[in-house]
Amino acid sequence: MESWPPGGSGPAEAGRRLRGLRGADLAASASLLSGAGAEAGCSAPAVAAVLPAGGSGERMGVPTPKQFCPILERPLISYTLQALERVSWIKDIVVAVTGENMEAMKCIIQRYQHKGISLVESGVTRHRSIFNGLKALAEDQPNCRLSKPEVVIIHDAVRPFVEEDVLLKVVTAAKEHGCSDYDLEFGTECLHLALKYCHIKAKLIEGSPDLWKVTYKRDLYAAESIIKERISQQICVVMDTKEDEEHVGHRLEEMLKNELNHVKVTSGRDLQQIILEQCYNFVCVNVMTSDFEETQKLLNMLEESNLSILYPVVVISVQFLDYESVPFGQKMENLMQIREFAKQVKKRNILLYGLLVYYPQDEQKLQESLRQGATIIAALIKERNSGLIGQLLVA
Ligand SMILES: Nc1ccn([C@@H]2O[C@H](COP(=O)(O)OP(=O)(O)OP(=O)(O)O)[C@@H](O)[C@H]2O)c(=O)n1
Ligand SMILES: O=P(O)(O)OC[C@@H](O)[C@@H](O)[C@@H](O)CO
C-alpha cells in the first residue's frame, strides 16, 4: 500500500474535505460523500462513479495501457463505460486518465457516444487517481456540471463485466453496514485507507465471477471470448419469400434452430424492431429477388441505425445454387460483387460474408448441405473474423 504524504493536499486532507468517506470494496467500491442526497431527504442516494484509468498496465506487457487495448477493435475502457452507463441511477461518471491520454480518451467518448462522462487527470498511484476523481465530485466549482453525489462507486476501468445488481448491493452496503475484523483482514487496501484516514468502517461484498480485472494478456483473450459469446445469442433470418413456409430458406431457418439450440433464431419480419432490440447477427436469404437485393436492403437499414457502433454486426448473405442447372461461371461473376459491398460496410463495423448453399434435387443431399450451411453460419457468427469478409463460402 502506498503511504500518503502528510499535509494539506494529501488524501487525509481530502478525506476531511469529503466529510466522511465510507467505503465498501471488492471489485467495485462505494464511498459516501455525506450530505448531498441524504440531506435533501431523497430515499435513493444520488450516485456517481469514479473510474481509475491512469495505469500503464505493466503486467500486460504491451506498449498500450491495457484500458486502451482493443477488444473487437473497441478499447477495453469503452466496455466498462457502457456497463456503467446502462445503470440509470448512476448520474455521473468521472474517469481519471493521464494527461498524455486525455485526448485519446475524449476521442473514445465521442466515437462510442458515451454520455455523462467527465475526465480528470490521474495520479501516480491508483489511489491518487481515485482521489482526483473524488475531488472533482466533492468540490463546488463554478460552471461544474457535476452534481454532488451521496455515494460514489469506485470501479477499475479494466473490469468490463460489472452488473447492476452487484453495484446496487455495494451502494446499499455503503450506507447500511459497518465493518468486521474479517473485512479488514481479507479486504483490499481501499478498505484499509477508508478506516485509517476517515475512520469509516467498510463492508466486503461478494462479487460475481465475471468481475475479474484485466491484468495479463490472457485476460484480453478471455474478455474477447465473453463478449463474442454474449453478442452471438440471437440470429435473425431475413428472407424474400415470406409466404411459402416450405421454401428452402425456411428450411435453413429450421436447421439453424435445431443445430444451435442455445441460440435464439428469429425471423426478420419486423427488422426495425429486431435492430432496436440489439440483435447483432443476420442471415439474409436471397431467393426470389436478384443476387443481393435482399442483402442490400438489410445493409442499408443497418447502416442507417446505430447498431454497429459498439459491436461488429455479422451479415451472412445466402444464395441457393443448383450447380447442375445454373452456369456456375456466370453466376460467380455476379456474386463476386460481395467483395466490394463487404469492403464498404466494413467501414461501418458490419462484417459481410457470402454463403453458397448447394440446392440439389436429391432430398438427402439437400438436407446435408443445409446442415453444413448452418455449421458455417454458426462459425462465422462465433468467430467474427474480419479477415474473412467478402468471401464466398460453399456448403
Ligand atoms: N496510477 C494509476 C495506476 C492504476 N490506475 C488504474 O487502477 C486500475 C487497477 O490497477 P492495475 O490493474 O494495477 O492497473 P495498472 O497499474 O495499469 O497495471 P500494472 O500494475 O500491471 O502496471 C486500472 O484501471 C488502472 O488504470 C490508475 O488509475 N492510476
Ligand atoms: O492486485 P492488483 O495489483 O492486481 O490490483 C489491486 C487493485 O487495483 C484492485 O484489486 C482494487 O479493485 C482493490 O481496491
Image: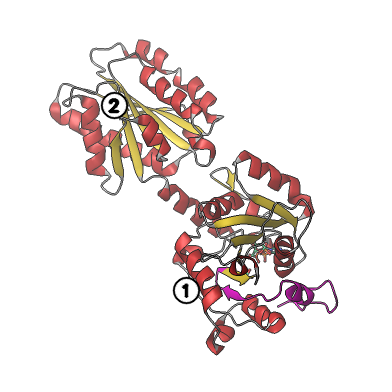
Question: Considering only vertical position in the picture, is 9 above or below 232?
Answer: below
Q: Residue 206 shows which numbered tag?
A: 1
Q: Which residue is drawn at 51% across and 20% down?
A: 340
Residue 1: x %, y % from top left: 70, 78
Quadrant holding ligand 2? bottom right
Q: In this view, does 354 lie to the left or right of 305?
A: left
Q: Which residue is drawn at 62% across and 69% down?
A: 39
Question: Considering only vertical position in the picture, is 37 above or below 106?
Answer: below
Give whichever of 355, 296 is nearer the camera.
296
Could you tell me the amino acid type at mark 2?
Val
Q: In this view, does 313 lie to the left or right of 94?
A: left
Residue 159: x %, y % from top left: 56, 60
Q: In which quarter of the image is the C terminus?
A: top left
**Residue under label 2:** 357
Q: Is any part of residue 93 visible from this angle?
A: yes
Give whichever of 387, 115 is nearer the camera.
115
